[in-house]
Amino acid sequence: MALISPVSSPNGKIFNQKLYARIRVATESDVPHIYKLMQQLFVYHNIIHLLKSTQSSIASGLFKPKFTNISPVTTLLVEVSANPFPSCPTGNVKEVELNLPLVDKESEQFRVIKDDHDDVFIAGFVMFYPCFSSFFEKPVFHMENFFLRECYKRKGFGKWLFSTMASEAARMGLSSVNWDASDWDESALEFYKQMGATISGGLRNLSLAGNALEAFDDDSN
């Protein structure tokens, strides 16, 4: 059967009939794409003014950590292509049938340059790390970021990406996966409920940062 290639268009890539996808662990070469995904996530939440990460800080924080005693952060990426992926680990590759053509207007911004495959694009990511929680007997995963680009939503990628992370937590014998969600984002809350999550109230997120934190860097304290 002939492969269906994405069609070039001034408006981006157009995928017809079928998409192939895989989930893989991010590497340092993915930093530019991770940064762009973070930007889109913050724009979605209308808090882009709060984004302090840079490509440099992402590279050093994720792949060259200064504080080696802090639990490492794992970033998983969803890649899509019109052609099958070679040599994919079992369970990390899938096919998606498309009822309608899918147009990725930002395809060139998220193109992945690889030696083994052409026309690969980043669709989304999840970032998480293990930590201790006094609410549970065993360590937990804290999910820091979870985001899919708009054109790839509602096609099963979100459930697949979330499930991959949760499966790793279960395999490791962790107690929980914890994260924060905006109370106004009803679609996200409904998605998390469908994935089996419970929503707890009564706690507020607090932060000590900037000058307030630096005030503690005083030998007289």
Image: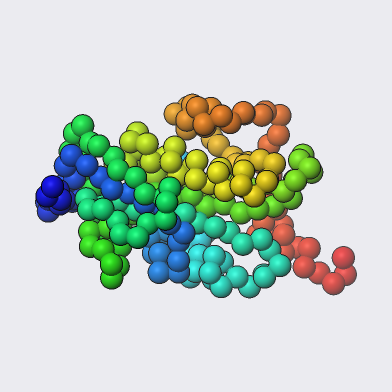
Report the front residue among 28 and 105: 28
Up/down of 154 relative to 124, above or below: above
Q: Residue at x 81, y 69 (%)?
A: 218
Q: Position of residue 56 (x, y in %)?
A: 48, 70
Q: Position of residue 50 (x, y in %)?
A: 52, 52
Q: Position of residue 101 (x, y in %)?
A: 17, 38
Q: Residue at x 35, y 33 (%)?
A: 154
Report the front residue among 158 and 38: 158
Q: Is residue 120 left or right of residue 212?
A: left
Q: How many marks?
A: 0
Q: Position of residue 75 (x, y in %)?
A: 50, 56
Q: Residue at x 35, y 60 (%)?
A: 87
In the rendered image, is residue 57 in sight?
no
Which colour scheme appears in the figure?
rainbow
Q: Quadrant of the C terminus?
A: bottom right
Q: Is residue 9 left or right of residue 61?
A: left
Q: Quadrant of residue 98?
A: top left
Up/down of 158 relative to 111, above or below: above
Q: Is residue 181 left or right of residue 105?
A: right
Q: Is residue 28 left or right of residue 156?
A: right
Q: Quadrant of residue 158?
A: top left
Q: Residue at x 28, y 70 (%)?
A: 115
In the rendered image, is residue 170 in sight?
yes
